């Protein structure tokens, strides 16, 4: 499904009514902010939260944006986050009482009602809780410089991301047959070279997902800092992703290199689960329980995207996230045994071990990636284009074809 496949897009959109954006996206966040600011008794908070949760699931299962890729993106990033926010901010925490801004440490509870509502809305959208006393761990260092320097840096990042995304998307667009589950295996020989070629395809798709997320964040940060609407302080817009040199284990890949937008949910629910189960904090078992809770929450968020594509797809994202949790448990078990045997190095591993770690993470990603990517193409999500216009396909490739034809 590319630019020209308008009939297939129209057929998909006709299956369900269009999503009433204000009713199911804007108003629920306002309602959640009001609940947080008013701080009603717990029973009332739970009752109101159940209504909001019902609305989120109802909207996800009933309406459409018109294309599979937009449905998956909206279902996971908006409605998935909405579900996690509702549960965290009404069940497990009292944000107006528990959270505060480091540069303005006065309790939010003493603010006027409308100010509390505004702060509550900011907390909902401040995914990593930047600048608060509960900021997510492993967030990159804040930007130190002027607004102009920040915007110039972001502009460079924006241009690099747009060019990169256009190039990789153009390649995937013209090679869908290498990604479709029913045809992909026919194009890769059962040899080391075939494995590397298949890995390169998976890598291109993963890079596209990474670039798409980074591009969206860059645009939001530039708008906020340029307009000063909402949070326009450059220090409150650190880079979305961490340092990729830290990704020498699967745990570090997810916990340090990847974004930390969901970590507030993972941290609170992981600690809550360990406490309920009576598992001593700081133990190996406590760590594993928290890891699996984190990936189950991430799976739930992405399964909301599954649901918005089609009810029949609900749960298909789960296998990928469950598998990554198991991979981390395997890693941690090996490291625990090595430490017990006195073989584990203290601190950051030496370069040779990190290189082996990078190879392991590469192999793991190329094996586990199809668990997520395969059904994306089967459900038509991967066949949609992300960018509305492609200079590579509209200008560069036709020009190269004309040059080749005249040669």
Image (tube, rainbow, N blue to C red):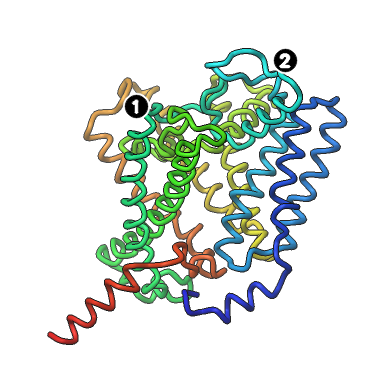
- Position of the C terminus, as image quadrant, is bottom left
**At 52% from the left edge and 52% from the top edge, which residue is drawn?**
320
Query: Going by the image, does 373 lie left or right of 28?
Result: left
> Where does the image place residue 118, in percent across and percent down from the top left?
67, 30
Q: In this view, does 5 lie to the left or right of 19?
A: left
* Secondary structure at numbered mark 1: loop
Outermost residue, left side: 407
Decide if residue 406 is in sight here: yes
Q: Residues within 10 Å of mark 1 (few under 14, many from 20)?
A: few
Q: In which quarter of the image is residue 127?
A: top right
> Residue at horizontal 70%, vertical 61%?
19
Who comes first in sequence, dot 2 or dot 1? 2
Residue 15, compared with residue 88, is above or below; it is below
Q: Residue at the location (56% across, 22% down)?
A: 132
* Along the line of sight, the residue nearer the viewer: 354 or 162: 162
Residue at numbered disc 2: 110
Residue 389 screen position, x and y as percent? 42, 67
Which residue is tagged 1? Answer: 145
**Image quadrant assignment for residue 13:** bottom right
Give the image quarter of residue 83. Answer: top right
Q: Which of 82 and 150 is in front in this view?
A: 150
Using the image, tell me which numbered label, if any, was put on residue 396. none
The vertical placement of 85 against 276, above or below, is below
Q: How crowded is mark 2: few (under 14 residues within 10 Å), some or many (20 or more)?
A: few
């Amino acid at each position: 499904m590319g630019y020209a496949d308008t009939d297939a897009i129209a057929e998909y959109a006709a299956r369900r009514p269009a999503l009433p954006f204000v009713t199911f996206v804007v108003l629920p966040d306002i309602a959640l902010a009001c609940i947080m600011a008013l701080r009603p008794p717990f029973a009332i908070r739970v009752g109101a939260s159940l209504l909001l949760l019902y609305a989120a699931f109802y909207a996800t299962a009933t309406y459409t944006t018109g294309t599979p890729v937009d449905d998956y993106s909206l279902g996971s990033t908006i409605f998935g986050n909405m579900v996690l926010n509702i549960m965290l901010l009404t069940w497990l925490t009292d944000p107006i009482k528990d959270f505060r801004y480091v540069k303005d440490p006065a309790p939010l509870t003493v603010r006027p009602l409308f100010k509390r509502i505004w702060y509550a809305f900011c907390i909902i959208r401040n995914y990593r809780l930047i600048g608060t006393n509960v900021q997510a761990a492993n967030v990159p260092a804040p930007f130190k410089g002027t607004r102009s320097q920040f915007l110039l840096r972001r502009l460079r990042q924006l241009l690099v991301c747009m060019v990169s995304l256009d190039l990789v998307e153009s390649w995937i667009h013209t090679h869908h047959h290498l990604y479709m589950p029913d045809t992909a295996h026919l194009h890769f020989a059962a040899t080391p070279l075939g494995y590397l070629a298949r890995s390169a395809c998976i890598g291109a798709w993963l890079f596209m997902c990474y670039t798409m997320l980074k591009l969206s964040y860059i645009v939001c940060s530039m708008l906020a800092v340029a307009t000063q609407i909402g949070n326009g302080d450059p220090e409150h817009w650190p880079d979305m992703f961490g340092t990729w040199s830290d990704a020498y284990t699967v745990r570090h890949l997810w916990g340090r290199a990847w974004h930390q937008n969901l970590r507030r949910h993972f941290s609170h629910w992981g600690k809550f689960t360990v406490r309920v189960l009576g598992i001593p904090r700081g133990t190996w078992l406590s760590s594993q329980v928290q890891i699996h809770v984190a990936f189950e929450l991430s799976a739930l968020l992405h399964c909301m995207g599954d649901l918005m594509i089609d009810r029949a797809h609900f749960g298909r994202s789960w296998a990928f996230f469950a598998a990554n949790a198991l991979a981390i448990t395997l890693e941690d078990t090996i490291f625990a045994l090595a430490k017990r045997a006195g073989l584990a190095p203290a601190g950051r591993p030496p370069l040779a071990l990190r290189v082996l770690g990078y190879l392991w993470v590469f192999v793991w990603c190329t094996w586990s990636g199809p668990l997520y990517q395969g059904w994306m193409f089967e459900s038509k999500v991967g066949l949609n284009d992300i960018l509305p216009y492609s200079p590579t396909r509209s200008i560069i490739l036709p020009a190269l074809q004309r040059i080749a034809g005249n040669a």
